Image (cartoon, grey):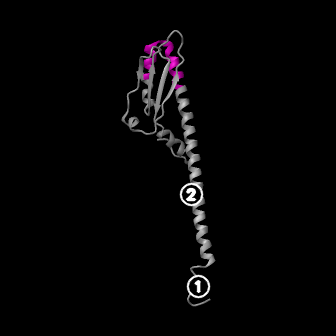
Amino acid sequence: MSAACGPVCSHSISVRLSRRLAIFTMAVLGVLFAITWGMVKVILSERSEQDLHARCELIADVVGRAAAGGEAAMLAQLQADAPMRADTRLEVWRPDGSLLHADRGSAALERSQHTRVHEFAIAAPSSCPAARCARATPSTTRATRRWAGAGHGSSSR
């Protein structure tokens, strides 16, 4: 080796290849991270949607059973269950389109950017046509945190 070049020359093939390999590795890791993030986002979205449908079916079932006792029993059931729907705003309408019940709005729900509106029907007995249509507007941040932490043993609270 010549004295001007030193132990490793700046134009050495090993230096150029190691730089290219490092850049290529970073690019591949970046693409893999982006793909993984996209898959996790899709999974969280699907689970959130499934959770929302299950919650709406449960609400429709409970309120539908209470409808057998008439409109007053249905309202009492909706008001009794309101604390369990802290991150959801539920609105229930009569068949004529007038509002039967609406949960109080919360500041946290109003500020949330992670809300989704889901309309569903409540099957009430023909003897009590009090409610037929409902709309649930939940915040999905709590559900997303719960699903994200499910694999790590963290609690949902």
The span picked out in magenta is 58-78
Residue at 61%, 79% (x, y): give it.
12
Query: Residue 49, located in which quarter of the rendered image?
Result: top right
Q: Which mark is residue 7?
A: 1
Q: Provide the residue designation for mark 2.
A: 30
Residue drawn at x 48%, y 23% is 134
Q: Where is residue 8 drawn, in percent x and y?
A: 59, 82
Q: Left or right: where does residue 4 sit relative to residue 88?
A: right
Q: Main secondary structure of the magenta part?
A: helix
Circle 2 sits in a helix, a strand or a loop, which is it?
A: helix
In the image shown, does 33 or 56 lie closer to the viewer?
33
Q: Residue furthest bottom?
A: 3
| Picture layout, residue 66 above or below residue 52 | above
Residue type at mark 2? Answer: Gly
Callout 1 secondary element: loop
Name the N-terminal-most of marks 1 and 2.
1
Image position of 137 with respect to 41: above or below: above
Return the residue found at the far top.
Answer: 127
Considering the image in quadrants, where does the N terminus appear?
bottom right
